[in-house]
Image: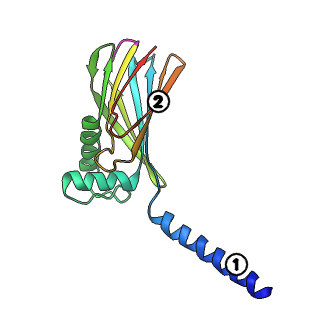
Amino acid sequence: MMFIFKSLVIKRTLYLLLFFIVFSFAHPYYLGVCELKYNIKSETVQASVKLFVNDLEATLKKKNHSTIDLINIKDSTKTAQLLFDYLNNHLKLKLNGTAKTFQYIGFEIDKDVIWIYLESNKCDKPVRIEIENTILYDFSKHQTNIVKIDVNEKSQNSKLTYPDKNLVFVF
């Protein structure tokens, strides 16, 4: 009886160790979050994009053919430009039928995720918001992007799973 108990403990320990090793080096899902909020005072749309650091680094490496380390940044100006260029090409916004561009505000790292902040130029209160979001689609065919929009304390959200890329919200 004691032998069976020890065998089960050893098996359980090995399974836990294997689980820890596998999921320590890669996460089993590919998820991005894009939060957009219309700021009444500044009359702008503020965007916050949350991604896994390792996924974004791999995508930028593939796209630019050079390694990038978002944790230990060597050139903050170059890094900011890489992040802005990538998001500018993969996150498009139309408000009330008019295409809007984003300005890069900055980013911050929170453990294994990165938050990137953008802001639109001044605009009227959005009634119809069209989004094209292909963030990290060039990294994984399993990518899912959640989009959340707040306008005047009303909130809507949806998700895009590769290859879907377009959403429309009406307020």
- What is the quadrant of residue 13 in the picture? bottom right
Q: Give the vertical position of 70 relative to 119 (above or below).
A: below
Task: Name the outermost residue toward the bottom.
Answer: 3
- Colour mapping used in the image: rainbow
Query: Which sits in the foreground, 168 or 96?
Result: 168
Query: Which sits in the foreground, 150 or 20?
Result: 20
Q: Residue at x 27, y 26 (%)?
A: 101
Residue at label 2? 158
What percent of the width, then of the height, locates residue 47? 40, 31
Q: Give the vertical position of 95 relative to 53 (above or below).
A: above
For the image, the number of numbered tags is 2
Residue type (three-letter) at the residue carrying disc 2: Ser
Residue at label 1? 8
SS label for mark 1: helix
Q: Residue at x 72, y 84 (%)?
A: 6
State which region is magenta: 123-127
Residue 125: in magenta span: yes
Q: Which of the two discs, 2 and 1, sits closer to the camera? A: 1
Task: Name the outermost residue toward the left.
Answer: 65
| Quarter of the image that includes the N terminus | bottom right
Q: Give the vertical position of 23 relative to 155 (above or below).
A: below
Mark 2–mark 1 Cα distance, whole angstroms, equals: 44 Å
Q: Main secondary structure of the magenta part?
A: loop
- What is the quadrant of residue 48 in the picture? top left
- Mark nearer the N terminus (2 vs 1): 1
Tell whether 22 sits left or right of 54. right
